[in-house]
Amino acid sequence: MTNPTVMFPFVLGALLGTFVISRLFWLVTKRWPDDNQKAVFLNGVSGVLIILADYLARPNADFIFEVLLYGSCQIVVLFYDLWRIARKKAR
């Protein structure tokens, strides 16, 4: 699966899934103050849960592939959250 054309749907789906799960965690913790520690904690927890859920849901899943795919997408979501918090504090 090294062909970028074949990988695009997997990456897009993983990015969408990690973003949606991360937003659900942000809704649950809405009363917490928005800061960098919250962003790192919530993205870490959602990343671990997404990786484990997908690994356990698919019988032929490769754990390293799951970590690389969902971990990298979760890092993108984390950078978005950190950027959003920094922009909010700058106002």
Image: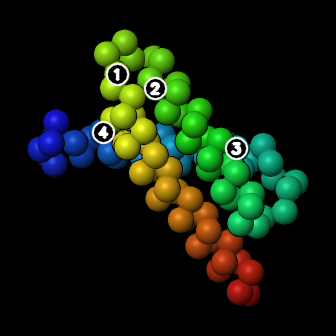
Q: Are marks 2 and 4 in contact (CB under 8 Å)?
A: no
- Compare residues 36 and 83 and report the one nearer the observer: 36
- Position of the C terminus, as image quadrant, is bottom right
Measure the alpha-carbon separation of dots 1 and 2.
8 Å
CA–CA distance in space, label 2 to label 3: 18 Å
Across and down, in percent, residue 58 comes to: 39, 17
* Three-letter code, disc 2: Asp
Q: Earlier in the sequence, mark 3 or mark 4?
A: 4
- Report which residue position mark 4 lands on: 10
Q: Residue at x 80, y 48 (%)?
A: 29
Q: Position of residue 35 (x, y in %)?
A: 76, 67
- Badge 3 local density, few (<14 within 10 Å), some, or many (20+)? some
Question: Toward which corner of the image does residue 59 lie, by quadrant?
Answer: top left
Q: Residue 40 in the image: state x and y as whole percent.
A: 66, 57
Residue topped by disc 1: 61
What is the number of the mark on residue 20? none
User: Is residue 10 shown above or below 75?
Assistant: above
Please give the label number shown on residue 25: 3
Depth check: give the residue in front, 89 or 39: 39
Circles 1 and 2: CB atoms closer than 8 Å: yes
Pointer 2 residue:
54
